[in-house]
Image (tube, helix red, strand yellow):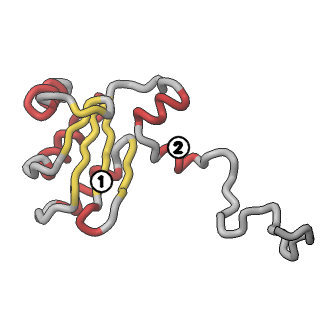
Amino acid sequence: MTADPPKYRPLERFWPYADLPEQPTEEELASLDPDLHEALFGERPRPFSITLVFPDLDVPAFTAALDLARASAEFREFGAGANRRYRARFWSSDAARLRDLFQIVGASDATEVLIDDRPVPYARELWLPLVWLLIQR
């Protein structure tokens, strides 16, 4: 090794990396996995919810299903191409719209039903019919 000073001195910033803000944006926080959000920030007080997660489906009423999903309490699209998924959260007061959406997308085995953001046994067979009882005739 030589005692000569180096001819190149790197800058104090990391050039190839983006200049990211220190705090996450509202969109980033909304897209966090619910378990990760709870671990980082604690439990969020929120009413009971049922969430439908479904892919693109080849059914005639799919555009109506997307309209119903977009009108839900929370709606997100994620993925691309064959991996695109739609996530629609409904409160118990939205039981009629939840039922209408499930009648369109529920026939697919790829549709997931989450109770308070968690997969629960018998969500389709037990929990959804219990919520249907909330619909006033």
Query: Mark 2 is on which residue type?
Result: Leu
Relative placement, left or right, of 111 versus 20 is: left
Name the secondary structure under disc 2.
Answer: helix
Query: Mark 1 is on which residue type?
Result: Tyr
Which of the two labelled residues, at mark 2 and mark 1, occupies the earlier sequence position? 2
x and y percentages locating residue 72 in the rendered image = 34, 44
Q: Quadrant of the C terminus?
A: top left
- Closer to us: 111 or 96: 111
- Closer to us: 22 or 30: 22
Q: Is residue 113 above or below residue 1?
A: above
Residue at the front extreme, as displayed: 1
Camera-side mark, 2 or 1: 2
Residue 129 numbered tag: none
Residue 15 appearing in the image: yes
Task: Using a 10 Å C-alpha cutoff, classify the residue at mark 1 as few (fewer than 14 neighbours), some (14 to 19) or many (20 or more).
Answer: some
Q: Quadrant of the N terminus?
A: bottom right
Residue 136 appearing in the image: no
Relative placement, left or right, of 70 versus 126 is: right
Image point (41%, 40%), residue name: 33
Please identify the quarter of the rendering in which residue 23 is found: top right
Q: Is residue 96 above or below residue 9?
A: above
Q: What residue does disc 1 label?
A: 86
Image point (33%, 40%), residue name: 89
x and y percentages locating residue 34 in the rendered image = 41, 35
- Closer to us: 15 or 4: 4
Q: What residue does disc 2 label?
A: 29
